[in-house]
């Protein structure tokens, strides 16, 4: 089995690559080759499974065709411009998030014109496809009314994924990821970045900025859970999905105050004192339009699982990124 990961240089892409190499298979099918692609060539891991890396921009016409020329069996499409950047740079957001996805779908369709080809395509969507008015818990079949360009781009891509799957060009499954926390590494341009920052930085003895009120509630899952979602989506029997090809992943609904309380349980009061309140109207406006809680029963019924408490999320970060230890403050 040949695996293609687009967006492989990002945090989720790197973790997915290592998880696939560790498993050596997708479901019962052994992995023979992994191709990694991103705008910057991903690091090529040393492994018994052959890996190769490419620097490519999916929004450039012809780039996607080169990636699928070897007809990979499973394609993970993780590449995207994140929410804050997509809102700040309208043209770039549509070029990467929408045009890049459309070019990929078309390249796969064209690859199957002369000889049948229908790979599993796992697409990472977002809970940002939903917008007001929001019920207390949002079901999978709620109408998409995104309030950001990023959410709009993801919603359009969900429709494309469903249509190309209906026509038999791809065997697609979209997974709407919760906000992933705690993200390791440096902050990115996502409007949601502070959700991770207010845990990650204090646990490393560094100051963090909180731009919104502690009463803000949001939907979370850990990087560990996100990788589990992707691996399961790659091996899942998609027949039960019918025409509704995208699932909202399970997660945890929690307030920022609950985040900070979990931080204190692991890092003490000294850690929480490293959070600096600095209101940002732009971020507050974006976050205010995001959903807060979901009814993810479709995904749960299919066996997808996530954390049950924010303590579980913080614990996963400490175990996976900090070697099980918190930096002294």
Image (cartoon, rainbow, N blue to C red):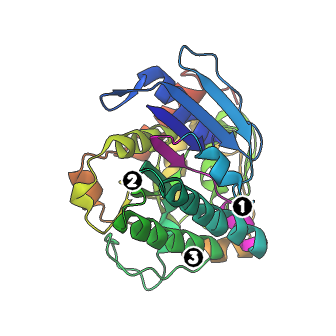
| Disc 1 crowd, CA 10 A, few/some/many (<14, 14-19, 20+) | many
Q: CA distance from mark 1 to mark 3?
A: 17 Å
Tell me if residue 219 can be seen.
Answer: yes
Residue 85: in magenta span: yes
Q: Residue at x 58, y 46 (%)?
A: 68
Q: Which residue is mark 1?
A: 59
**Residue 311, located in which quarter of the rendered image?**
top left
Asked if the residue under mark 1 is in contact with the one under mark 2, i.e. CB atoms within 8 Å, the reply is no
- The location of residue 122, given as percent across then percent down, is 45, 51
Which image quarter is the C terminus in? top right
Q: In the figure, is residue 229 to the left or right of 126?
A: left
Tally the marks. Answer: 3
Q: Which residue is mark 3?
A: 152
Question: Callout 2: helix, strand or loop?
Answer: loop
- Of 106 and 292, nearer the camera is 106
Q: CA distance from mark 2 to mark 1?
A: 31 Å
Q: Earlier in the sequence, mark 2 or mark 1?
A: 1
Q: Residue at x 38, y 63 (%)?
A: 165
- Of 30 and 18, nearer the camera is 30
- Of 164 and 265, nearer the camera is 164
Residue 151's disc is none
Question: Callout 1: helix, strand or loop?
Answer: loop
Q: Earlier in the sequence, mark 1 or mark 3?
A: 1
Question: Callout 3: helix, strand or loop?
Answer: helix
Q: Which residue is mark 2?
A: 251
Above or below residue 208? Residue 224 is above
Asked if the residue under mark 3 is in contact with the one under mark 2, i.e. CB atoms within 8 Å, the reply is no
Above or below residue 29? Residue 137 is below
| Disc 3 crowd, CA 10 A, few/some/many (<14, 14-19, 20+) | many
Please report the bounds of the magenta region as a residue range.
Answer: 71-89
């Amino acid at each position: 089995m040949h695996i293609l990961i687009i967006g492989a240089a990002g945090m989720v892409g790197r973790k997915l690559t290592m998880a696939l190499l560790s498993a050596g298979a997708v479901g019962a099918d052994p992995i023979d080759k992994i191709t990694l692609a991103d705008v910057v060539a991903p690091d090529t891991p040393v492994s018994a499974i052959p890996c190769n890396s490419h620097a490519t921009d999916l929004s450039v016409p012809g780039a996607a065709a080169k990636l699928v020329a070897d007809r990979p069996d499973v394609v993970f499409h993780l590449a995207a411009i994140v929410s804050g950047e997509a809102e700040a740079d309208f043209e770039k957001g549509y070029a990467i998030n929408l045009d890049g996805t459309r070019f990929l779908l078309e390249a796969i369709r064209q690859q199957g014109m002369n000889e049948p080809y229908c790979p599993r395509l796992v697409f990472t969507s977002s809970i940002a496809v939903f917008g007001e008015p929001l019920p207390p818990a949002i079901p999978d079949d709620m109408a998409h009314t995104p309030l950001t360009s990023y959410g709009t781009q993801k919603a359009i891509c969900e429709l494309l994924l469903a249509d190309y799957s209906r026509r038999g060009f791809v065997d697609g499954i979209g997974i709407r990821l919760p906000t992933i926390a705690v993200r390791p590494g440096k902050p990115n341009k996502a409007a949601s970045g502070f959700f991770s920052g207010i845990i990650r930085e204090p646990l490393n003895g560094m100051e963090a900025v909180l731009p919104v009120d502690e009463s803000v509630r949001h939907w979370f899952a850990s990087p560990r859970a996100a990788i589990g979602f992707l691996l399961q989506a790659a091996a899942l029997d998609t027949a039960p999905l019918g025409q509704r090809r995208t699932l909202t992943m399970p997660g945890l609904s929690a307030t920022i105050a609950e985040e900070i309380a979990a931080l204190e349980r692991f890092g003490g009061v000294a850690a929480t004192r490293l959070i600096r309140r600095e209101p940002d109207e732009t971020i507050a406006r974006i976050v205010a339009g995001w959903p807060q809680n979901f009814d993810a029963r479709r995904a749960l019924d299919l066996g997808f699982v996530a954390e049950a408490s924010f303590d579980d999320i913080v614990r996963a970060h400490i175990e996976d990124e900090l070697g099980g230890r918190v930096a002294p403050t």
